[in-house]
Image (tube, rainbow, N blue to C red):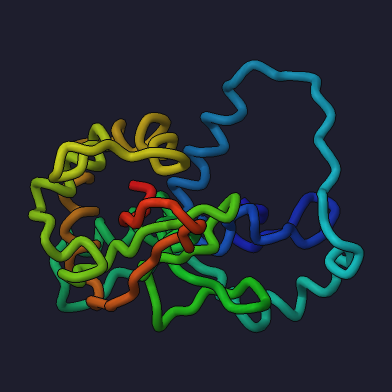
């Protein structure tokens, strides 16, 4: 629970935020205990962990104390007064369990999320991939998607135009999101469609001679 809530390991060392404890911290104690119960019920595997592949200036873990002071606020999700039960459930799923912002929100030079661009997408996502804008902006985001479009996408990865999710998002759907209840998918869709609309076009730079097309990596 300390690892998920505070980003601290059994020895007291800080974890790097590539382990998204910055989102998992918002999980309830009940859900943290459920995760522990599930993980400890899996077959044990004797396999050494790979060492971190980091430049020398990032290998000094105590520096993470300063990073956390700047960008990390521990504690479970607090329901927002005035919003519906479904909206709050969707917010909990998006910001904690599904940690959508960890990929869909741009980061600054120190790796901190830019809250003013929540869910606005980035061209510098995991593995240097393009991560789409999922705010309800009609030009650059998912503003033209209906709630049923988004629910269907979370279930099977199909976009309104008949294309399918690829890359890491396909893995997220196949290994996680499709197992949500329909009520949870609906709550998640409701919340995402209600966040602030941000115009932010995210496209890869095209090589010379390459056909120009949107590359949103859905």
The quadrant holding residue 105 is bottom left
Q: Residue at x 38, y 73 (%)?
A: 118
| Residue found at the far top of this picture | 43
Residue 213 lies left or right of residue 66; in this view the side is left
| Residue found at the far front of this picture | 209
Residue 59: where, in percent of width, then height? Answer: 88, 62
On screen, residue 151 above or below 67? above
Residue 18 lies left or right of residue 96; in this view the side is right
The quadrant holding residue 198 is bottom left
Q: Nearer the viewer, residue 80 or 191?
A: 191
Residue 103 visible in the current orientation: yes
Residue 3: where, in percent of width, then height? Answer: 66, 53
Residue 26 visible in the current orientation: no
Q: Nearer the viewer, residue 82 or 97?
A: 97
Q: Nearer the viewer, residue 28 or 171?
A: 171
Q: Nearer the viewer, residue 210 or 44?
A: 210
Q: Residue at x 61, y 51 (%)?
A: 1
Residue 35: where, in percent of width, then height? Answer: 51, 38
Residue 14 lies left or right of residue 59; in this view the side is left
Residue 80: where, in percent of width, then height? Answer: 26, 74
Q: Residue at x 11, y 61 (%)?
A: 144
On screen, residue 36 above or below 17? above
Q: Residue at x 85, y 71 (%)?
A: 62
Number of residue marks: 0
On screen, residue 75 above or below 3? below
């Amino acid at each position: 629970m300390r690892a998920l809530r505070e980003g601290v390991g059994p020895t007291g060392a800080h974890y790097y935020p590539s382990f998204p404890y910055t989102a998992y911290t918002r999980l309830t104690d009940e859900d943290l205990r459920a995760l522990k119960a599930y993980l400890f019920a899996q077959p044990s595997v004797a396999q050494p962990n790979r060492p971190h592949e980091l430049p020398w200036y990032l290998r000094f873990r105590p520096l993470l104390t300063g990073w956390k002071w700047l960008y990390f606020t521990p504690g479970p999700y607090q329901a927002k007064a005035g919003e519906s039960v479904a909206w709050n459930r969707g917010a909990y799923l998006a910001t904690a369990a599904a940690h959508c912002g960890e990929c869909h929100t741009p980061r600054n030079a120190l790796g901190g999320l830019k809250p003013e661009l929540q869910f606005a997408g980035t061209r510098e996502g995991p593995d240097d991939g393009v991560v789409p804008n999922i705010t309800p902006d009609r030009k650059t985001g998912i503003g033209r998607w209906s709630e049923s479009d988004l629910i269907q996408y979370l279930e099977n990865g199909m976009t309104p135009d008949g294309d399918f999710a690829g890359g890491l998002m396909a893995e997220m759907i196949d290994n996680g999101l499709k197992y949500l209840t329909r009520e949870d998918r609906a709550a998640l869709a409701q919340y995402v469609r209600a966040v602030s609309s941000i115009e932010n076009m995210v496209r890869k730079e095209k090589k010379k001679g390459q056909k120009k097309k949107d590359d949103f990596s859905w």
